Amino acid sequence: MKLFDVYPLNDITITKAQGSYVWDENGVQYLDMYGGHAVISIGHTHPHWVKRIEDQLEKIAFYSNSVHIPIQQQLADKLAKVSGKEDFQLFLVNSGAEANENAIKLASFHNGKKKIVAFKKAFHGRTSLAVAATDNKALVAPVNETDNVDFLTFNDEAALKTYFQTRGKEVCAVIVEGIQGVGGINIATDSFLQLIRRLCDQNDAVFIADEVQCGYGRTGKFFCLDHAGVQADIYTMAKGMGNGFPVGGLLIAPHIKPKHGMLGTTFGGNHLACAAALAVLEVIEEENLIEFAKQRGMYLMNRLRTIDGIENVRGKGLMIGFDVPEDLKDLRKKLLYDFNIFTGEAKPNVIRLLPSLALSRKQSDEFLEALQEAIAELKPKAKKTGSVQQEEEVRAED
Ligand SMILES: Cc1ncc(COP(=O)(O)O)c(C=O)c1O
C-alpha cells in the first residue's frame, strides 16, 4: 500500500534524537533549529520525559473519559501553576487543529453567536472550523467554505474598530496568534491585542488566543499574550505541550461554563498523553526553560542582526524569523544538506527558527557560524552582482 502523498519530503530518514540533535540512518548528526515544527520544547528524548512515559505505560496507557483519570487533574494543577491561569479550566484534546475547532465551537455554544473574526495570514489548522479561519484558500475544501468567518488585516486597529462598529454585536469570537507562525513570524502589537480584548468585552465576544505554536514558554513567557498584559478567554495549546507526544488542550476562563456532552473526545486526556504533558511542565519548571528561552532568543536575535545578507530579524524568545533575499534563496536547503541544520520556513522567503527551549549557547553559536558560512558560500555570485550594481550607481552619480 502506498502512503497518501501529501507531504513534500526532504530526502532524510531520522532514526535517533537527543536534546537539540537528531541523527539519520547513516549516523549523520543534524542540529535541530526547527524542533520538528515547534514541537520539541524540552529537548528530544529528555530522560525525565522518557521515564514518565515508560512508568505510565507499565500502569495504564488509556482508558476512556467515562471514568476518573486523576493524572488529568495533576496536569491541570501543574498547568495552573506554570501558566499562572489558576482559575481557568482545562479541556484536553489531541492536536492544535482540534484545540481550535473546540475553542470556536465552545465560544459559539457560550454566546449563541456565529461570526468569527480571524486575520490575514493566520493558520489555525485543518479541521472544518479551524481551516475556515485559516487564511489559505488552498487548504479550504468546498465543504469547509462558510460566511461565518471574516478576515481582517493583522495589526490594523482602525479596520478592527470599523468592523466592530458595524458588526460588533454579531461577533461570536476573535481568534488570533500572538505571533503568526506559518504566516511568517508576524508579531501582534500589544495595543492590537489590548484592542481585541476591549472590543470582545464590549460586544460579548470570546477572545481566543491560538497559542499552539507561540505558547508554552516558547516566547519567554508561558503564553505569548502575557507580553501584552492581555488575558484571553480561551487559550489553545498543542505542539510544545507533549514534546512530541500528541496532546493538545484548551484553557478556558471561569465565566465559560461546561455542560455535560457539549465537548468530547475518545483519546483526549488519555493517561499516557497526560504523563508526557506533565513531564514537559516538570522539566520546564525544573530547568527554568521559559527564562532560558527568553535569554537564548535575545542572544540569537542580537547576533543575527549583525549578519550581512539576511533581513528583518524578528521574534520573541525562541520563535524567530528573518527574511532571505532572492540571491540567497537556497539558504535553507544549503543549511540542511551542506551544514546538517534543520530550520523552518514560511513561504515565500522567511526562515523560521523554532528550536528546543533548552538550546545551548554552544549550539546557538554552531548555528550562527554555519549560517554565516552558508551565506558566504552562496554570496560570491550575489556579491559580484552587488558590486557591479554599486559601480553603476557610482558612475550614474558621476
Ligand atoms: C498557530 C497554529 N495553530 C494550529 C495549528 C494546527 O496544529 P496541528 O497541526 O497540531 O493540528 C498549527 C500548526 O502548525 C499552528 O501553527
Image (cartoon, grey):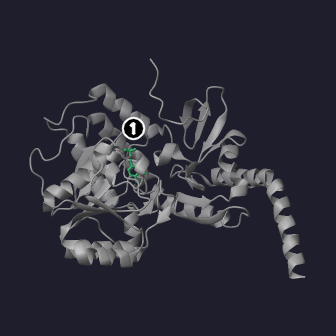
Count neighbours of disc 1 (C-alpha within 10 A) and say few if under 14, some if 14 to 19, many if 20 or more.
many
Of 379 and 64, nearer the camera is: 379
Where is residue 315? Give x, y as percent.
53, 64
- Residue 84, visible in the rendered structure: no
Quarter residue 104 falls in:
bottom left
Residue at horizontal 55 percent and vertical 47 percent from the top: 34
Left or right, 61 with reference to 67: right
In the rendered image, residue 272, in percent from the top left (x then y), is placed at 31, 34
- Measured as percent of width and height from the top left, residue 71 is found at 24, 41
* Residue 181, position as x, y percentages in the image: 47, 56
Whether residue 133 is visible here, answered yes or no, is yes
Query: Image check: 280 left or right of 258?
Result: right
Residue that extends furthest to the front in the rendered view of this protein: 142
Three-letter amino acid code at the position of disc 1 = Phe
Q: Determine the residue positioned at 69% across, 48% down.
A: 330
Element under disc 1 = loop
The one of 9 and 212 positioned closer to us in this rendering: 9
Name, please, the residue furthest toward the top: 1
Say whether residue 106 is left or right of residue 194: left
Residue 397 sits in quarter: bottom right
Above-or-below relation of 251 to 39: below
- Please count the marks in the image: 1
Hey, which residue is sitting farthest left in the picture? Answer: 260
Q: Which quadrant is the N terminus positioned in?
A: top left
Which residue matches tag 1?
Answer: 245
* Quarter the C terminus occupies: bottom right
Q: Ligand 1 near label 1 (Cβ, under 8 Å)?
A: no
